[in-house]
Image: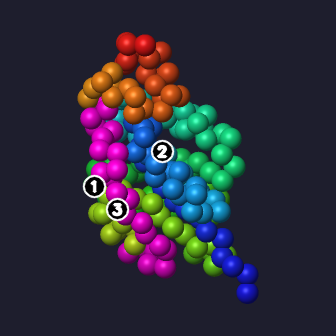
Amino acid sequence: MREKRRVGITFGCFIPLHKGHLSIIKQAETENNSVILGVTGHDMDRGRDFIPFLRRLRLMHSVYASHSKVTISEVDDRAIGLTGTFSLSAWKRWCDELFYGAGYHPNDPRNEFHWYIGEKSYIEKIETLYPEHHFHLMDRSIIPLSGTAIREDPERYSGYIHPVFLDYLKKNRQITKS
């Protein structure tokens, strides 16, 4: 019998892409044959339009263009009718969009899916939908900085922001220091 192909899954709003995200994505790339990288959220995610959704999607495509293992999947929450707190049926719709956008089926017996997630509550919901998948709760204290802190003071934390996102923020005068 042929060995299953390991597929890593991780996702985020990436407002902006920072060192914490990068460490999770790198681990998923290292441990799997391929990776589904979900760019999620919507334009006004996190309370304001810090980086519009489609711009984040384009920036992520730019960052991961040379990563042959990575497939980016777009999950625009509002485009699929999701707002606020997700119910289990909303999580199902969200996951369907994630898998469809990456060209995978979540129950494909040829694949072994490994989720890399930083929020325990997300694992609890998704694990209910896919009990046969594997879930890894990521240690967010390794890089003790959140996207919220970065958005509140992007100049102070500019060293944590991926260079492609940093250039965007500078061009849009959200960071004024060089």
Classify mark 3: helix, strand or loop. helix
The residue carrying mark 1 is 85
Q: Percent position (x, y) of residue 30?
A: 58, 57
Three-letter amino acid code at disc 3?
Tyr
Three-letter amino acid code at disc 2?
Leu
Q: Residue 144 in magenta?
A: yes
Quarter where residue 119 is shown: bottom left
Residue 156 lies, with reference to residue 60, above or below; the image says above
The residue carrying mark 3 is 122
Q: Residue furthest right?
A: 1
Q: Count of labels shown?
A: 3
Rendered residue at 53%/28% (across/down) = 164
Q: Is residue 26 left or right of residue 159?
A: right
Q: Percent position (x, y) of residue 116?
A: 45, 60
Q: Percent position (x, y) of residue 61?
A: 60, 38
Three-letter amino acid code at disc 1?
Thr
Label drawn at residue 1: none
Binning the other alpha carbons within 10 Å of mark 3 as few (below 14), some (14 to 19) or many (20 upward) gives few
Classify mark 2: helix, strand or loop. helix
Rendered residue at 73%/81% (across/down) = 2
Quarter where residue 59 is shown: top right
Which residues are drawn in magenta? 128-151
- Label 2 vs label 3: CA separation? 19 Å
**Which numbered disc, 2 or 1, marks the residue closer to the eye?**
2
Is residue 47 at least partly visible in the picture? no
Verify CB contact (< 8 Å) between mark 2 and mark 3.
no
